[in-house]
């Protein structure tokens, strides 16, 4: 009986699952300050060129064009939206959305 109890406790300890609430974020808010500005364009550029670490734990917020990856195209898309009244980023924008995957692990901005 003791052996079963030890095995059961080991299974619980080793195999515990945590259920975190989904993080809320806004596409294009790369620095997670709650505003979509030229600073977000700069943050994406710096992150792509490995000049700076990601400012918040939400890579999806930097994916301005919604292509499922962060590239130079996101810089162009976001700069066009901000400075030339181009198309808005895809949802979640302008309101907060949720992410249950591994690309966004904290709330961003005012979410």
Image (cartoon, grey):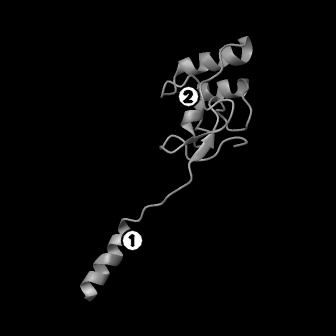
Image quarter where the N terminus lies is: bottom left
Above or below: residue 5 compared with residue 98 = below
Furthest-top residue in this view? 84
In the displayed structure, does residue 21 sit left or right of residue 101? right
Q: Gap between marks 2 and 1, in whole Å? A: 37 Å
Q: Residue furthest bottom?
A: 1
Circles 2, 1 touching at the beta carbon (< 8 Å): no
What label sits on residue 22 in the rendered view? none
- Dot 1 falls on a residue whose secondary structure is helix
Quadrant where the C terminus sits is: top right
Q: Earlier in the sequence, mark 2 or mark 1?
A: 1
Give the answer, above or below, for where 14 lies relative to 35. Answer: below
Above or below, comparing residue 80 to residue 95 in the picture? above
- Residue 3 percent location from the top left of the image: 25, 84
Location of residue 82 by image quarter: top right
Dot 1 crowding, Cα within 10 Å, few <14, some 14–19, many 20+: few
Q: Residue at x 37, y 71 (%)?
A: 12
Q: Secondary structure at mark 2?
A: loop
Query: 76 or 53: nearer the eye?
Result: 76
**Circle 2 Cα neighbour tier, 10 Å, few/some/many (<14 / 14–19 / ≥20):** many
From the top left corner, tell me how far across and down residue 45 is, in percent.
60, 24
Q: Position of residue 41 (x, y in %)?
A: 66, 24
Res. 102 visible in picture: yes
Identify which residue is drawn at 62% across, 31% down: 27
Residue that mark 2 sits on: 63
Residue 56 is at least partly visible in this image: no
Q: Residue at x 59, y 30 (%)?
A: 62
Q: Which residue is mark 1?
A: 13
Is 64 above or below relative to 1?
above
């Amino acid at each position: 009986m003791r052996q079963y109890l030890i095995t059961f406790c080991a299974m619980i300890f080793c195999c515990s699952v945590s259920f975190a609430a989904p993080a809320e974020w806004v596409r294009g808010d790369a620095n997670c300050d709650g505003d979509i500005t030229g600073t977000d364009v700069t943050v994406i550029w710096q992150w792509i060129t490995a000049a700076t670490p990601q400012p918040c734990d939400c890579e999806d917020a930097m994916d301005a064009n919604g292509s499922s990856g962060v590239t130079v195209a996101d810089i162009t898309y976001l700069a066009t939206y901000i400075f030339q009244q181009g198309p808005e980023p895809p949802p979640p924008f302008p309101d907060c959305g949720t992410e249950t995957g591994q690309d966004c692990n904290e709330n961003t901005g005012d979410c």
